[in-house]
C-alpha cells in the first residue's frame, strides 16, 4: 500500500477497527476513510454502492460486523446471519465493481467445528458441525471467506481473509452484562480489591463511568452492594471478598492483544497477496484464510490469578460449576501466519498490564 493511498476501514469504532486505524496512522497512512453506522448502513445495498462510487477507496479493511455474546447470538439468530451476510456481500461486491486493489475480510475463529482438533488449522474448516449457539454468525463468516475466495478465482481480485483469535485491548467492552471473559475479570477483580479496602471512592468512580443496570456512583451503598453481589463480587461475614467466576476455571483460551492483531493485518496487506495463502499447483483452492493469534493458551483459572496478582486483590475466587464451561480448549495453529512473516509481540502478562492501565484511564 502506498502511504497516500485511499484506505477505507469499515467498523472503525470497534475493538478491531480502532486498532487498525491507530496502526495505519502510526505508519504514516493519512488518507483513511471512515463512516459511522449513522452515516452509512452497510446492510443497505444502495447506500454502500453510492459510497464506493463516490469515494473510490483503493484498499478496504472489512472489520464491521454484528457481534455479541452467547445469549445475543442464540436469541437474535436471524439478525446475526442476515446483517453479517448483507454487510459482507455489499462491501465485497462493491469493492470488486469499483476496482479496489486489495481487501481484507476479518472473521472469527468460531468458524471452526465445535469439537475441532487442537490447535485449529485452517484446513479444519467445514470438517464437522459448528457450535449451535453461534452457528448463524459462524456461517455468515464462512460465507465471507468463500465470497472472497470465489471472487478472487473468478474475477482476479486480491481479497484476503483473516480469522483473529480472542482479542482484548483498547476500546474493549467492560460492561459486565455483555463483556467477554478477560475484560469482565479485570473489572470484577478491580471492584473486589476496592471492596476489600472499603474504597467507595473507587467504586463510585467506576459506577459513574460504567453504570451497571442503572446503578451509578450516586446510588445508595446498599444498591451498589446488591448489584456487586449479583455479578459475583461480595464481602463475606468474615470480611473476605470473593469474586465469582463462571465454570470450573479449567477451560483454556488463547488471547491476542488487539494492537498486535492490527499489526498482523496491516503487515499482510502491505506484503502479501491472495496467491500467497495457498500452495502453488494446488488443484482445489480452498481454506485460503489465515489464522491470526499467538498459538498459546491459558486456563481461565490461571488467567484469573494473573489478574489478581497484577491488581493486588487479596480475596478468593469462587468457581461456579453450575455455569457452563463451554469448549474446553480453543487454540489456533499460527504456522501459516508465521510462515507468511509475522509473529505476535505482546505476551499475556504484558497485555494484562496494558489492559488494566487502559481500564484505569
Image (cartoon, rainbow, N blue to C red):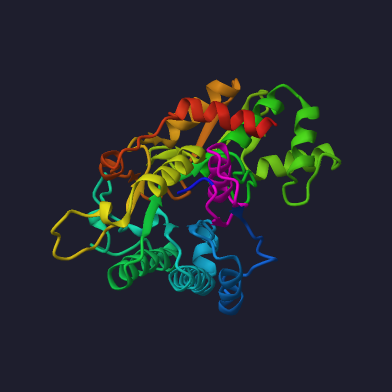
Image height of 323 relative to 282, above or below: above
Q: Position of residue 53 (x, y in %)?
A: 57, 72
Instruction: Say whether residue 30 is magenta.
Output: yes
Give the magenta-colored segment's residue range: 4-31
> Total label count?
0
Task: Give the residue at x 13% y 59%.
Answer: 281
Q: Is residue 225 left or right of residue 10?
A: right
Q: Position of residue 125 (x, y in %)?
A: 27, 59
Q: Note whether residue 330 is visible.
A: yes
Q: Is residue 14 left or right of residue 198?
A: left
Task: Give the residue at x 23% y 50%.
Answer: 117
Image height of 63 relative to 247, above or below: below
Q: Quadrant of residue 239?
A: top right
Q: Is residue 282 left or right of residue 76?
A: left
Q: Position of residue 206 (x, y in %)?
A: 74, 36
Image height of 199 relative to 102, above or below: above
Residue at the outermost bottom position: 46
Q: Position of residue 49 (x, y in %)?
A: 56, 75
Amino acid at each position: 500500500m502506498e502511504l497516500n493511498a485511499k484506505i477505507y476501514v469499515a467498523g472503525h469504532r470497534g475493538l478491531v477497527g480502532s486498532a487498525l486505524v491507530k496502526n495505519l496512522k502510526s505508519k504514516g497512512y493519512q488518507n483513511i476513510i471512515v463512516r459511522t453506522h449513522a452515516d452509512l448502513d452497510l446492510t443497505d445495498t444502495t447506500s454502500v454502492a453510492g459510497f464506493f462510487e463516490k469515494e473510490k477507496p483503493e484498499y478496504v479493511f472489512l472489520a464491521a460486523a454484528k457481534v455479541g455474546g452467547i445469549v445475543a447470538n442464540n436469541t437474535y439468530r436471524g439478525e446475526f446471519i442476515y446483517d453479517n451476510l448483507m454487510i459482507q456481500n455489499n462491501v465485497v461486491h462493491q469493492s470488486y465493481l469499483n476496482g479496489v486493489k486489495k481487501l481484507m475480510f476479518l472473521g472469527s475463529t468460531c468458524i471452526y467445528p465445535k469439537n475441532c482438533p487442537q490447535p485449529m488449522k485452517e484446513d479444519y474448516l467445514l470438517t464437522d458441525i459448528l457450535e449451535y449457539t453461534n452457528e448463524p454468525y459462524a456461517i455468515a463468516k464462512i460465507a465471507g471467506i468463500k465470497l472472497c475466495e470465489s471472487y478472487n478465482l473468478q474475477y482476479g481480485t486480491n481479497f484476503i481473509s483473516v480469522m483473529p483469535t480472542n482479542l482484548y485491548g483498547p476500546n474493549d467492552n467492560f460492561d459486565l452484562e455483555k463483556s467477554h471473559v478477560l475484560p469482565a475479570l479485570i473489572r470484577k477483580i478491580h471492584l473486589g480489591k476496592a471492596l476489600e479496602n472499603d474504597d467507595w471512592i473507587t467504586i463510585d468512580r467506576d459506577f459513574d463511568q460504567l453504570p451497571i443496570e442503572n446503578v451509578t456512583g450516586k446510588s445508595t451503598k446498599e444498591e451498589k452492594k446488591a448489584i456487586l453481589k449479583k455479578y459475583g463480587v461480595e464481602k463475606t461475614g468474615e470480611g473476605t471478598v470473593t469474586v465469582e467466576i463462571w465454570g470450573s476455571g479449567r477451560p483454556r483460551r488463547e488471547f491476542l492483544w488487539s494492537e498486535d492483531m492490527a499489526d498482523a493485518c496491516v503487515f499482510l496487506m502491505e506484503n502479501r497477496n491472495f496467491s500467497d495463502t495457498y500452495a502453488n499447483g494446488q488443484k482445489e483452492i480452498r481454506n485460503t484464510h489465515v489464522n491470526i493469534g499467538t498459538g498459546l493458551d491459558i486456563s481461565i483459572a490461571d488467567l484469573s490469578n494473573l489478574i489478581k496478582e497484577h491488581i493486588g486483590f487479596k480475596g478468593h475466587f469462587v468457581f461456579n460449576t453450575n455455569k457452563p464451561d463451554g469448549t474446553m480448549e480453543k487454540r489456533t495453529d499460527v504456522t501459516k501466519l508465521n510462515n507468511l512473516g509475522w509473529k505476535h509481540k505482546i505476551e499475556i502478562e504484558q497485555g494484562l498490564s496494558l489492559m488494566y492501565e487502559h481500564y484505569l484511564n
